[in-house]
Amino acid sequence: MNRVMALVNERGPAAVESRDQFEQLYRLHVGEVHAYAAARVGRSQAEDITAEVFHAAARAARGGRPEVLTPAWLMTVVRNKVIDHWRRDQRRRAKLHLLWSGRESTEAGAVADIAVTREAVLTALDRMEQHHRLLLMMHYVDGINVPELAALIGKSVSATESALARARRTFKKYFAREETTDE
């Protein structure tokens, strides 16, 4: 752990100016990055996080920012990737909890109603254009807020809000059709 803390505090010169230096940076620090992640998320997830960290490092090096590639930068990135992992895992657990707690507390008739509604929702989503369906899924299922969604799709926040509004209107139209055909 002392080695990891020394890496975090290191503020030396640019770590990477060539491919050979990048490979050297990788060989020197992959162990520390992996150990940091493994201690927080387990070995299997740590491998993915380590790959993400060095992928970000490669992008920074290729993007003309090799000066940021210091050991301290690597440790900051791995810390952020671990936090992102925890957040994704927490959202996934919350969704599973809502799914199972909702089903356990309902009676048989209510479960049938849920199944019919679920089928109507899925059918309505299937009828929508892919970009509208993806916007709704990313926003409402994955929990991505509008500014983050705008950054992901490369549009302004106001354009993304407008696209979401159109997607909601389209969904309501298809969902209303599904409910009327089920009755």
Image (cartoon, helix red, strand yellow):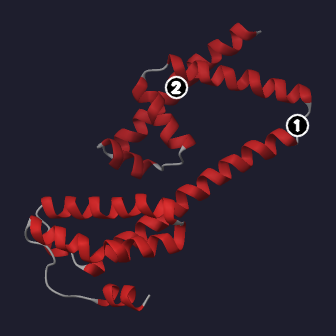
Kind of residue sitting beneath label 1: Thr
Distance from the alpha carbon under mark 1 to that under mark 2:
30 Å
Query: As rendered, which of 19 and 13 lies closer to the eye?
Result: 19
Above or below for 174 versus 74: above
Q: Nearer the viewer, mark 1 or mark 2?
A: 1
Mark 1 element type: loop
Query: As rendered, which of 157 and 35 lies closer to the eye?
Result: 35
In the drawing, does residue 129 fall left or right of residue 141? left
Quadrant where the C terminus sits is top right
Total numbered labels: 2
Q: Which of the marked residues, 1 or 2, is nearer the chain's N terminus?
A: 1
Q: Crowdedness of circle 2 by 10 Å Cα count: few (<14), some, many (20+)?
A: few
Residue pointed to by mark 1: 106
In the drawing, does residue 54 fall left or right of residue 62? right
Identified at 29% across, 43% down, the residue is 154
Mark 2 element type: helix
Quadrant where the N terminus sits is bottom left
Residue 153 at what x, y percent from top left?
33, 41
Identified at 53% across, 55% down, the residue is 88
Kind of residue sitting beneath label 2: Arg
Residue pointed to by mark 2: 169
In the drawing, does residue 39 fall left or right of residue 179? left
Label disc, if present, on residue 158 of the rendered structure: none
In the drawing, does residue 13 fall left or right of residue 165? left
Query: As rendered, which of 98 and 35 lies closer to the eye?
Result: 35
Residue 158 at what x, y percent from top left?
37, 43
Identified at 90% across, 25% down, the residue is 109
